[in-house]
Image: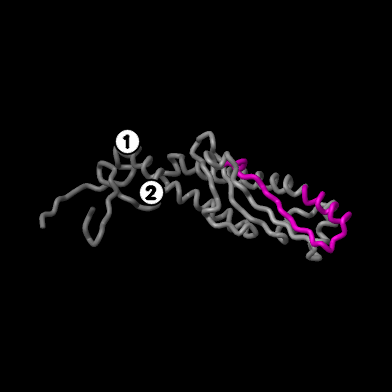
Amino acid sequence: MRQIPVNIYKLEELSKDVRHNVIMNWRGNNICYVTDEVVTEFITDNPVLDLDPEDVKYSVEGSQGDGACFDMALTTVPIRDMFLKDKSMDQLKRYINANKIEVTARTRRNAWANSYNHEKTRDIEVDWHIADSVDFVTARECESALAKLDKIITIWYRLKCRKLYQDLEDTYMDWMSTEQMVEDIESTDTEFYADGTVHMVIAGLHV
């Protein structure tokens, strides 16, 4: 087997144009891993939402429809604990605690979702069931309180989406900086050929 000597280089040893191309390729190949970490942290910090990674949608590439959203479904107990804290909701809470009322809330895709991923691509749909044993007057009062949940949950949801998008955008912009790219490449001790191709050793062979 004939051996051909070749030169390998660290990033800083490459020519300016080749170094630029290496950084651009590195950035494009690894950005998904960086934003995935933000999504994972969001899911971990919000266990009550019971989200999977595929429930979270986002775009942070500088386009018109950039944003973030997530698909969720909430049941009675999380809704009670998260949104019925105002005293005006006390009566409704009592009947929920007595298992006389069940309420659910979920996101529903709207027409915006066909093109974008921001918080307004989802509407909040609230449904409830009031037991027949609840008297008519009390049932109407509870329905009046339940009707407010649509707006309350929508405001909460959109703020949640905006915070997620801000975290994603901040991470994306940090990652896009040349300084961050150089630091990341150097931390891996990656070596290159003169044309910027990554030098790898597989089973003792240099490829």
Q: Quadrant of residue 197?
A: top left
Residue 182 in the image: state x and y as whole percent: 40, 44
Q: Which residue is mark 1?
A: 16
Q: Quadrant of residue 139?
A: bottom right
> On residue 186, which mark appears?
2
Kind of element beneath mark 2: helix
Q: Nearer the viewer, residue 107 or 10?
A: 107
105 magenta-colored: no
Crowd band around label 2 with a 10 angstrom C-alpha radius: few (<14), some (14–19), many (20+): some
Query: Which residue is pictured at 72% across the width and 47% down the height?
Result: 150
Query: Which residue is pictured at 55% across the width and 50% down the height?
Result: 56
Quarter of the image with the N terminus is bottom left
Q: Nearer the viewer, residue 124 or 191?
A: 124
Query: Which residue is pictured at 50% across the width and 52% down the height?
Result: 36
Q: CA distance from mark 1 to mark 2?
A: 16 Å
- Report the amino acid beneath label 1: Lys
Q: Are marks 1 and 2 in contact (CB under 8 Å)?
A: no
Residue 54 in the image: state x and y as whole percent: 52, 53
The part of the chain drawn in magenta is 118-147
The residue furthest bottom is 98
> On residue 149, which mark appears?
none
